[in-house]
Amino acid sequence: MKGVDVRSMNISRPVQGLLVVAAGLAAFAYWKGHEAPTSMSHERNAPSITASATRAVSRSEAAVPPASDAARAASSGGTASAMPAPPAPAPAMVDVFPSQNWLPPPPPPPPVSAAPPPPPEPPPLPFVVRSLWLDQHGALYVVLNAASKDFMLCAQCDRKGFLRAGDVLLNVYRIESVSDQGVRFLYLPLKRKQQLTFGGGR
């Protein structure tokens, strides 16, 4: 079938314009008829795709475990460790060339001499005057008592049984002198003198 040349046909120009418009409308209607089913099929498939994507995302979130406390602590520790450390203190200065003193050390101080302790004291005299008298010649006689014993002394006499200067009583008391004031003894262990006065002891 041969194509029809519209130009060879005896058709007025207004009619030709209408034919062109009609052909354009027919082509547009044909194109819209094919586009509508395609867009509808896309719209029908879109909810299922969206639902599938949502379920996939939910499953991926469920598969990932929540962050543990250790991870949070590590994260906080990492943040804390990221902070700059305070500057270290400056090292102390060391004198590598200290001053030297070549002088000899001073002599030690002399030892402090402690005062000598006082000499020990002899014990008190154990004697008690029992009697005292003078004879017709003025000689003095004394009777002493100690350790339940009587000791007869005289100043200057030759009578037997009487003790005089130089004699020892109780093995430790030597008679030094006998007078009307009293009797003087020497305590032999300490070489200390003691006086027994008449009327009291010392």
Image: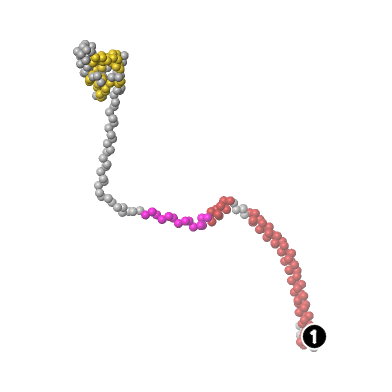
Q: Quadrant of residue 88 in the image? A: bottom left
The residue at the point 23 percent across, 11 percent down is 161
**Residue 91 within the segment the image draws in magenta:** yes
Residue at mark 1:
15
The x and y percentages for residue 115 are 28, 34
Q: Is residue 92 left or right of residue 101?
A: right
> 40 or 108: which is nearer to us?
108
The residue at the point 26 percent across, 23 percent down is 194
Q: Is residue 65 left or right of residue 44?
A: left
* The C terminus sits in image quarter: top left
The x and y percentages for residue 81 are 51, 55
Residue 164 at least partly seen = no
- Name, please, the residue furthest toward the top: 160
Residue 184 at least partly seen = yes
Q: Is residue 60 left or right of residue 19?
A: left
Question: What is the total number of numbered labels drawn onto the structure image?
Answer: 1
Type of amino acid at the residue the image marks with label 1: Val
> 46 or 37: which is nearer to us?
46
* The N terminus sits in image quarter: bottom right
The residue at the point 72 percent across, 62 percent down is 47
- Name, please, the residue furthest toward the front: 136
Q: Quadrant of residue 106 in the image? A: top left
Magenta highlight range: 80-93
